[in-house]
Image (cartoon, coloured by chain):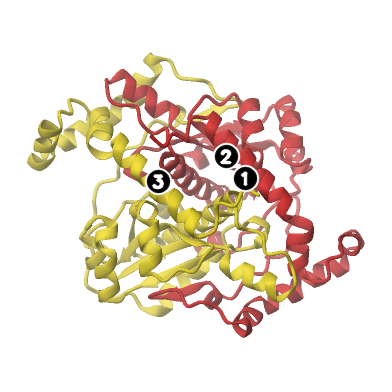
Chain colours: A yellow, B red
Amino acid sequence: MRDFHSVLNEHRSIRKYKKTPVKKELIQKILDAGTRASSSGNMQPYSIIVTTDEDLKKELLPLHFNQSMVMDAPVLVTFCADFNRMRKWLKLNQAPENFDNLMSYLIGMIDATLASQNVALAAEAEGLGICFMGTTLASNKEISKVLKLPSHCVPVVGFSLGYPDEMPEKRDRLPLDGIVHYETYKDYSDTRIEEIYHQKETEGMKRYQKDPKLREMMREGGAENLAQVYTKLKYTRESHLNYSKDVFDCLEEAGFLHFQ
Amino acid sequence: MRDFHSVLNEHRSIRKYKKTPVKKELIQKILDAGTRASSSGNMQPYSIIVTTDEDLKKELLPLHFNQSMVMDAPVLVTFCADFNRMRKWLKLNQAPENFDNLMSYLIGMIDATLASQNVALAAEAEGLGICFMGTTLASNKEISKVLKLPSHCVPVVGFSLGYPDEMPEKRDRLPLDGIVHYETYKDYSDTRIEEIYHQKETEGMKRYQKDPKLREMMREGGAENLAQVYTKLKYTRESHLNYSKDVFDCLEEAGFLHFQ
C-alpha cells in the first residue's frame, strides 16, 4: 500500500490498462472506503454501479464518446445520485417521501462525488489506475437506460478502473495562488489572468504542437491558441447548450424537478 | 503523518475545535493536494475561499444556520464552481466565452467537490478535523454576497477546519451491498429495504432516545421513527422546495442558466 502523501499528490489519469482483471474482494475494499466519505445528514443518497460485462460496456461505449478505455479497462464504475432507495424506505415507514426536487439532486450529486474521490484514491493506493469520464454527466439520460436506473436515480460521475499500462507525466495545474482567495474573492485583472495561465498555455501548446493530429485539429478548427482550443474545438457553445438540455431533460424524467 | 488506510476509513465529522490556529503554510499544503484531484479537461473551474476573519464568520454564521462551529473553528473553507476566471482568460485570447449554462455549473460543481474531498483527506492526514456544511449549497445566494463572488462563480461545498477537540464515534453506514449494484441497477423489494436500513434505524433511534432534546423534538414534530425524523423534522418538503428555488435563483443570477 502506497503512502498517503504520494497517493494524494501523484494522481495521473490512466487511459491504458493491462488485461489483468480486478478481483471482486479488491473492488469491494475500495468501494467500502468510498462509503466513509462525508454524507449530508448521513443519508448516503447514492448508488454505485460496477460494470464489467462486455456487452454492457459495448452499449456504454458510444455514450462515453467511444473512448477506447471503456472497452480496455476491466471495470467501469458509475456513481449515481440516488434517492430511490431512501424514498422506498420513507414510504415503508409512513414518512413523507420528498427528495424529488433540484436541491435533492444536488445533494445526491455532491455525496456521490465525494464518495467517488475516496474510491479513486483507495484504488490508486492499491496500485490501480482510474480516469474520470465527464461523459457520465453529458450522457446521463442514455446511461440511465443502459444501467436500468429507476426514477430519482441518475448518473453523476464515473471512471474506468484497472491496472495501469502507462505512466503519463503529471498534468500541469494552475498556480495555487491563482485559485485560492483569502477572506473574500479578489477578482482578477488582465495582467493577473495572464500570469495565472502562462504556464498552462505554454505546456498546452507544446502538447498540441508535438502531436500532428492535434495540430491538424487546430488548423481545421481555426484555433490559434489554447483558449481557442477549449471553446472553438472542445467545449463549443452549441455542445454545452445541448448537454445542458439533455441533463435538464434527464433530471425532469427522473423526477428531480418539482418546484412545488 | 497518518497512514493512508486509516485516513480514508477513519473519518469523523469534527464539530468541536481547539483554539489553536492553523498555520498558513499548512493550509497551503492541504489546498495544494486539492488541486491534484481530477478536473474535467484540466480546466480547474473552481476557486477556494479561506475565511478566518471573525467579522466575516459572523456574517456567515446565520447562513450556516447558526452552527456554533462556524465561530469556533479557526478556518472555514468554501469551494466554489468558478468559470469567471476561465472566461476572463478566454476573452483575453479572443476565444468564445461560453460556460454560462447548466452543464458548466455542474462540471464546476463536480470539480470543486472532488478537490474538496482531497483537501479534507489531506487535512485529516495532518491531524486536522473537518465538518462539511450542506448549508453552503442551501445558502449559496447569500454566501455569494458575503464572499463577494463575481458572476459565473457560486459556492458548492464547504467545511469548518481546525484541530479536533472531540473524537466522536464513527457514524454508521448502510451495508455496502445495499449501495453497490453489479452490472445494472437491481431495484429494491420492501424486504430488502428493511434489511438495508435495519442497523441505521436501530442506531439512529438509540441516538434520539438517549438525548432528551432530540426526544422532545420527535414528540413535538409527531415523528415516530427515524424515517419520519428525516422528512417530518429535518428535510421537510417545504424547506427543500425553498432551497431548490433559492439555488435556482442563485444560478440564474450568477449567469449559469442560459439555454440558448
Question: How far apart are labels 1 and 2 at the CA level?
Answer: 6 Å
**Label 3 SS:** helix
Q: Nearer the viewer, residue A116 or A235?
A: A235
Question: How far apart are labels 1 and 3 at the CA level?
Answer: 18 Å
Question: Do labels 1 and 2 touch, CB within 8 Å?
Answer: yes
Point out which mark residue B248 bears: 2
Question: Do labels 2 and 3 touch, CB within 8 Å?
Answer: no
Residue appearing at x 21%, y 26% in the figure: A225
Chain of the residue under the numbered disc 1 shown in the image: B
**Compared to A38, does B115 lie above or below?**
above
Chain of the residue under the numbered disc 3 shown in the image: A
Same chain for the residues under marks 1 and 2 in the image: yes
Foreground mark, 1 or 3? 3
Point out which mark residue A245 bears: 3
Residue kind at label 2, given as amino acid type = Phe
- Toward the front, the furthest residue is A260
Residue appearing at x 39%, y 50% in the figure: A246
Question: How far apart are labels 2 and 3 at the CA level?
Answer: 15 Å
Instruction: Answer few, some or many: residues within 10 Å of disc 1's Cα (few below 14, many 20 plus, some between 14 and 19).
Output: many
